Amino acid sequence: MTSESVLKNIIRELVQTGAYKDEQSALQAMAIEQVLKKIRNYRRTIKRLQRKYKVDDLKEFTCQIKNQANILQEDDWMEWKAAVEMLEGWEKTLCELTKSEL
């Protein structure tokens, strides 16, 4: 059984049980939930790094370590930068999902 057929079966069952009005709304809700999980994860990463370095944002942290960063700080900077970029991307995706119908 392919992942596509498994997903179709799950969606069909959700509609049949009355959890969703149709397959399109079920798929959209499932997609939104996955995007929200990604957003929460990246926000947690950013908050963790803000607390760790006692700064408000990546820009402030960048200034703090400029020309004096150790390897751990460089690793954290890369993780933080990636989290910020991914968060922005997933937030745009969420916006698109919530304003359009799949």
Image: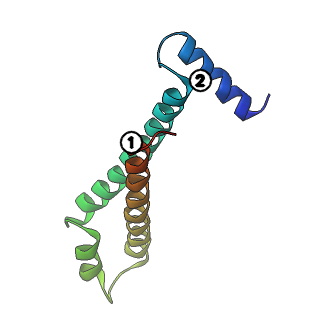
What secondary structure is marked by label 2?
Answer: helix
| Nearer to me, 80 or 40 | 40
| Nearer to me, 35 or 67 | 35
The image position of residue 74, as x and y in percent, is 41, 76
Q: What is the three-letter code of the residue carrying label 2?
A: Ile
Please identify the quarter of the rendering in which residue 64 is found: bottom left
Q: How crowded is the residue under tag 2: few (<14 C-alpha within 10 Å), some, or many (20+)?
A: many
| Nearer to me, 77 or 8 | 8
* Residues tagged 2 and 1 counted as in contact (Cβ below 8 A): no
The image position of residue 83, as x and y in percent, is 40, 61
Q: Where, quadrant-wise, is the N terminus in this rendering? A: top right
Q: Is residue 24 above or below residue 99?
A: above
Query: What residue lies at 40% left-to-right and 47% top-to-bottom?
Result: 94
Query: What residue lies at 38% left-to-right and 79% top-to-bottom?
Result: 70
The image position of residue 4, as x and y in percent, is 71, 34
Please identify the quarter of the rendering in which residue 48 is found: bottom left
The Cα atoms of the two marked residues, 2 and 1, are separated by: 19 Å
Which residue is under mark 2? Answer: 11
Which residue is under mark 1? Answer: 98
Q: What is the three-letter code of the residue carrying label 1?
A: Thr
Q: How is the model colour-coded?
A: rainbow
Q: How crowded is the residue under tag 1: few (<14 C-alpha within 10 Å), some, or many (20+)?
A: few
Which residue is farthest top? 17
Image label count:
2
Which residue is farthest right? 1
Q: Is residue 101 above or below residue 78?
A: above
Query: What residue lies at 33% left-to-right and 50% top-to-bottom?
Result: 44
